[in-house]
């Protein structure tokens, strides 16, 4: 059997939940470690805490796969006596790589929200909010003979990337017309005379973040003094998944029953309830982590209740005003359910590829909160 490398584990995760599905503010992927290093054991955890880092070293793991990123913001120093920095230093010292799949795992099929819906045994589940990216469609008219030059320039700048493909585009030949005015320096034709030219209409999709670079590359590569082009905004789903899920409970129950049910299924000591104490709840929306931002969508889709975490005071008041029963089961409890899914995904890949690889779930992935009864 062959040994896997850090980059192999990262590729398995990236195929499941590609990094481009993550939010722009997130920091996912391989954060610490040598991509070429061999891996015999992987520790899967919710957070890379000092306890998890120690556990990885004790259990002989060469890599940690976590949900929450170890590094969110650029580090200005790397000192063992500073919180958040010492862990990075120790992992690097011990040769342990750290990989994170965060908001991209939230929206992925089989990710956090599917795991949460499965834990609550929801039936007939649908996506709560489609995961769409703000993109543009570029359309440009290119004179015959210059198509390759312009297309390769915009591709290099970021246009034409879609899912696991790049250099995607569509082209059709036609005839363009224009009349150069006084003061122009036309590439084709003469000032004051209408000109017909054989041109190619070329179209490609691009991410909104790449628009400035693509337009700059287009203007540099295009032979016309004033190229004819436009950018049209389009919404394109990033994935088959999306944020949150909505489905039906195995049986209808009231608010207190649902609270106890959620506690049992998510293995948490308690939940906070806010909203009308409905006697019959059957349609439930879920959103792992901090999901109170989905209240409006849950209401629009007919949910009787929303189960999420990290609900603040004003969000609770808003849910109350909307008539939505809100259950706050905590950030960790609503996401920890995905850890078994990560273990299974990596172990399945290891078996299929005949890697000598052991995948273990952390024993230190605990909720930092302690419940005290009044």
Image (tube, rainbow, N blue to C red):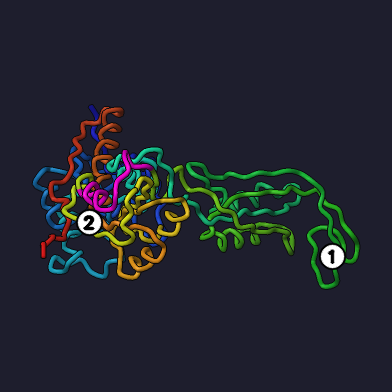
The residue indicated by pointer 1 is 180
Residue at image position (62%, 45%) is 169
Q: Nearer the viewer, residue 10 or 324?
A: 324
Counting from the top left corner in percent of width and height, residue 212 is at 57, 63
The residue lying furthest to the right in this view is 193
The residue indicated by pointer 2 is 271
Quadrant where the C terminus lies?
bottom left
Counting from the top left corner in percent of width and height, residue 123 is at 37, 38
Compared to residue 61, the image places residue 218 above or below, namely below
Residue at image position (80%, 69%) is 184
Is-magenta flag for residue 249?
yes
Measured Cα–Cα span from mark 1 to mark 2? 71 Å
Compared to residue 70, the image places residue 163 above or below, namely above
Residue density around tag 2, few if under 14, some if 14–19, many if 20 or more, within 10 Å: many
* Quadrant assignment, res 272: bottom left
**Horizontal side, residue 233 vs residue 226: left or right:** left
**Horizontal side, residue 1 vs residue 245: left or right:** left
Which residues are drawn in magenta?
A: 248-263
Counting from the top left corner in percent of width and height, residue 40 is at 19, 37
Q: Is residue 98 visible?
A: no
The residue lying furthest to the left in this view is 58
Q: Secondary structure at mark 1?
A: loop
- Tell me which label, 1 or 2, sits earlier in the chain: 1
């Amino acid at each position: 059997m062959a040994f896997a490398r850090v980059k192999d584990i990262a590729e398995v995760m990236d195929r499941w939940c590609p990094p481009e599905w993550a939010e722009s503010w997130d920091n996912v992927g391989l954060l610490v470690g040598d991509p070429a290093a061999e891996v015999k054991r992987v520790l899967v955890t919710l957070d890379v805490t000092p306890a998890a880092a120690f556990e990885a070293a004790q259990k002989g793991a060469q890599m940690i796969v976590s949900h929450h990123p170890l590094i969110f913001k650029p580090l200005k120093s790397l000192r063992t006596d500073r919180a958040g920095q010492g862990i990075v230093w120790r992992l690097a010292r011990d040769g342990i790589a750290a990989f994170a799949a965060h908001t991209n795992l939230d929206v992925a099929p089989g990710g956090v929200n599917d795991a949460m819906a499965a834990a609550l045994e929801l039936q007939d589940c649908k996506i709560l909010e489609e995961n769409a990216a703000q993109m543009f469609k570029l359309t440009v008219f290119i004179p015959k003979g210059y198509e390759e030059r312009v297309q390769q320039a915009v591709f290099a700048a970021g246009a034409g990337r879609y899912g696991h493909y790049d250099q995607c585009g569509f082209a059709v030949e036609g005839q363009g017309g224009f009349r150069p005015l006084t003061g122009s320096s036309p590439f084709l034709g003469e000032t004051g005379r209408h000109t017909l030219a054989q041109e190619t209409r070329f179209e490609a999709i691009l991410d909104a973040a790449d628009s400035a670079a693509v337009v700059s590359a287009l203007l540099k590569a295009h032979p016309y003094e004033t190229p004819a082009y436009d950018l049209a905004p389009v919404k394109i789903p990033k994935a088959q998944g999306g944020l949150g899920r909505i489905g039906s409970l195995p049986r209808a129950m009231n608010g207190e029953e649902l609270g106890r049910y959620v506690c049992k299924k998510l293995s948490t000591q308690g939940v906070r309830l806010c909203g009308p104490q409905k006697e019959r709840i059957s349609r439930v929306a879920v959103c792992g982590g901090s999901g109170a931002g989905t209240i409006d969508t849950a209401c629009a889709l007919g949910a009787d209740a929303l189960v999420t975490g990290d609900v603040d005071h004003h969000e609770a008041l808003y849910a109350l005003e909307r008539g939505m029963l809100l259950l706050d089961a905590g950030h960790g409890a609503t996401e920890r359910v995905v850890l078994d899914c990560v273990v299974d995904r990596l172990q399945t890949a290891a078996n299929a590829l005949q890697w000598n690889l052991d995948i273990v779930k952390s024993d230190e992935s605990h909720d930092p909160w302690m419940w005290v009864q009044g």
